[in-house]
Image (cartoon, helix red, strand yellow):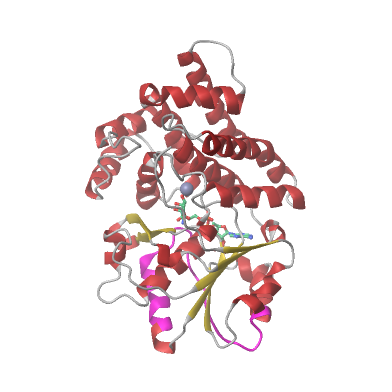
Amino acid sequence: MQDFSFYNPTRIEFGAGKIATIDQLVPTNAKVLVLYGGESAKRNGTLDEVTAALGDRQVQLFGGIEPNPSFETLMEAVQKVREQKLDYLLAVGGGSVIDGTKFVAAAALHEGDAWDILLQGGQNITAALPFGSVLTLPATGSEMNKGSVITRKSLQAKLPFMSELVFPQFSILDPVKTYTLPTRQIANGVVDAFMHVIEQYLTYPANAPVQDRFAEGLLQTLTEIGPKALANPEDYQTRASLMWTATLALNGLIGAGVPQDWATHMLGHELTALHGLDHAQTLAIILPEMLRQRKTAKLGKLVQYAERVWNITEGSDDEKAEAAIERTRDFFESVGVKTRLSDYDLGAEHIDTIIDSLTQHGMTALGEHGDVTPEHCRQILLASL
Ligand code: NZQ
Ligand code: ZN
């Protein structure tokens, strides 16, 4: 096992009706900005429930945070926070709203150009406003982690940052709030959570048996409940499992003490920035060919994944690895997330620009060994057509 430092200060309030606990979690004298996305939180009553729970506190609203939250929109929220001297943020939504709120929390107290936060990956964050979240979409794990991904539309750039100062103080996870999610977003959530586990598990053996078993448990849970969550939107127990699985997939626990990959995510960000694909769609396209391209370096873990997650016990190591890659692709397709660039009308002519952008963003030594180059990524995209 590798050395590690594990820190996670986020309180989770899990269950139906838990929005009411906001009253105990937000300081009574807080001047609150509630941030949300499009219309979903308004339409399904979540926003009303949140403002009711905030009671007599001074509350302002900021709506319109888009999927793949933009720097441009978020800077308007930063301006509002500064002008109105607001001192507490509350995100109501999916990963985009929570990520956006993390950025606002840091940018509001940042001196100088806030885009530098992204350029330095968050290392220059010295303070951030406190905030909580009400999660409405199980997928990203943002509700219990220190990461955020922000898009600058004018530059077609989508970049991550991390800081311990942007852990939510608390997150409310009420599975009932997921009932109104469209099928596409549930499918995206299943794939994204699955991918978060894969990025921290499918690397090379690191003498970390408990992390491996946790990861395999999360993967198997997702293959089991993913189809049920799609078929029965109001099955509370299934939605509850999905919600907690997605949180555990990226709250630091399974990644402590093990090597991590993230190459699929970094290449995926370029596809979203340039072509607007949903985050999970990009991952479903890239992963199968990423695994095939890196089969030799990952063979030990691929075989373990094949045997323990997919119960593939027949054949040579190479055959097991190949079968596991195809089972993974089939799983993504079975929940309705397509796995080929051509499914999204993207052809070979787009690949040069994607690779140029990846290179420009400094993503030139990816993966758990830092040996995935832009040229490998080009081959992966060509194989994913
Ligand atoms: O905007 P509204 O109207 O709220 O609609 C949203 C949005 O259109 C809708 N939605 C959310 N909850 C709903 C709902 N519709 C009906 N009922 C509900 N209960 O769903 C749509 C997608 O929402 P979004 O927040 O964009 O999705 P997701 O949670 O998948 O977040 C994706 C973003 O998170 C980033 C991604 O890159 C992407 O920008 N990620 C963040 C990570 C992190 N912070 O650790 C890690 C991930 O790998 C990921 O990169
Ligand atoms: Zn992701």
- Which x, y percent locates residue 345? 43, 39
Is residue 279 positioned above or below 312 on the image?
below
Residue at image point 51% right, 41% down: 197
In the displayed structure image, the side of residue 165 where residue 55 appears, left or right: right
Is residue 253 positioned above or below 292 on the image?
below
**Which residue is the extreme one toward the top?**
315
Magenta run includes residue 64: yes
In the displayed structure image, the side of residue 87 where residue 54 appears, left or right: right
Query: Splitting the image into 4 quarters, where does residue 19 fall?
Result: bottom right
**In the foreground, 66 or 254:** 254
In the displayed structure image, the side of residue 188 where residue 183 appears, left or right: right
**In the foreground, 142 or 273:** 142
Residue at image point 40% right, 87% down: 83
Q: Which residues are magenta?
A: 53-81
Q: Quadrant of the C terminus?
A: top left
- Which x, y percent locates residue 379? 31, 29
Magenta run includes residue 144: no
Query: Splitting the image into 4 quarters, where does residue 306 fall?
Result: top right
**In the foreground, 349 or 36:** 36
- Which x, y percent locates residue 225? 68, 40
- Which x, y percent locates residue 377? 31, 34
Residue at image point 48% right, 74% down: 130
Residue at image point 69% right, 45% down: 229
Q: Quadrant of the N terminus?
A: top left
